[in-house]
Image (cartoon, rainbow, N blue to C red):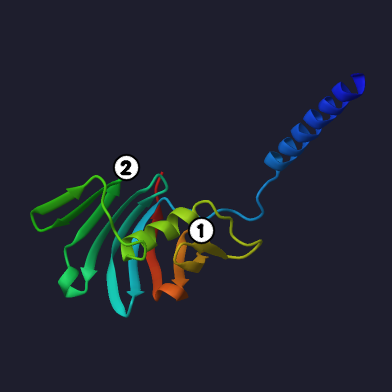
Amino acid sequence: MAKRILNIVCVILSVTAVLLCGCDREQTGESIITNFKGEFSAVYRGMQLEGSLVHLRQGVFSLSFSKPETLRGLQIHKKNGVLSLIRDNARATADEPYLPPDSFPLLLAELLDTAGNKALSDGGNTCTLSLSAGEATLTADENRLPQSAVIDSAAFAVSFRHCEPLQ
């Protein structure tokens, strides 16, 4: 009986030590800042897109398109799972929207949401992300703000400029 209690105590102490050591490890490299606003240029399935972006790690983002001409003025906002499409004075809102997982807004949101939890390589400015559409390579500037990203398997490339961090 005493041997069994001793084994249980050893197991509890071992598990506690493993958990404490694992949680205490620091990440190597600094993480990418994904709470930001800026402008973007993208190539998505052969289409050239340009516009502005606001992204917050809590799943909040806002896209405003300036190119191509057919999308000029279109705004896409997502907050708390509610998606809004706005153009001119018309607004459409859906609280449980379905967008294909490889759509431009969802790829961009998944890329930035995933990057917010990822550290840059030691001393470098890139990281590799595993996304539902495939592997992405993201490059950050000297301030750790996103600079560009590529998802080869999704025919997706985006570059960011005039980025400013948000609180």
Q: Kindly identify which residue carries mark 2.
A: 80
**Does residue 77 appear to the left or right of 69 in the view shown?**
right
The picture quadrant where one finds residue 125 is bottom right
Q: Earlier in the sequence, mark 2 or mark 1?
A: 2
**Does residue 2 appear to the left or right of 153 in the view shown?**
right
Between 2 and 83, the one lying in front of the other is 2
Position of residue 158 measured from the top left corner of the image (x, y, whole percent): 39, 70
Position of residue 15 measured from the top left corner of the image (x, y, whole percent): 76, 34
Neighbour tally class for label 1: few under 14, some 14-19, many 20 plus, Cα within 10 Å = few
Extreme-top residue of the structure: 1
Which residue corresponds to the image point at 32% horizontal and 42% vertical from the top-left?
80
Q: Which mark is residue 143?
A: 1
Secondary structure beneath disc 1?
loop
Position of the N terminus, as image quadrant, is top right
Q: Is residue 149 above or below residue 165?
A: below
Q: Amino acid at mark 2?
A: Asn
Which residue corresponds to the image point at 45% horizontal and 69% vertical from the top-left?
148
Disc 2 vs disc 1: Cβ atoms closer than 8 Å? no
State which mark lies toward you, 2 or 1.
2
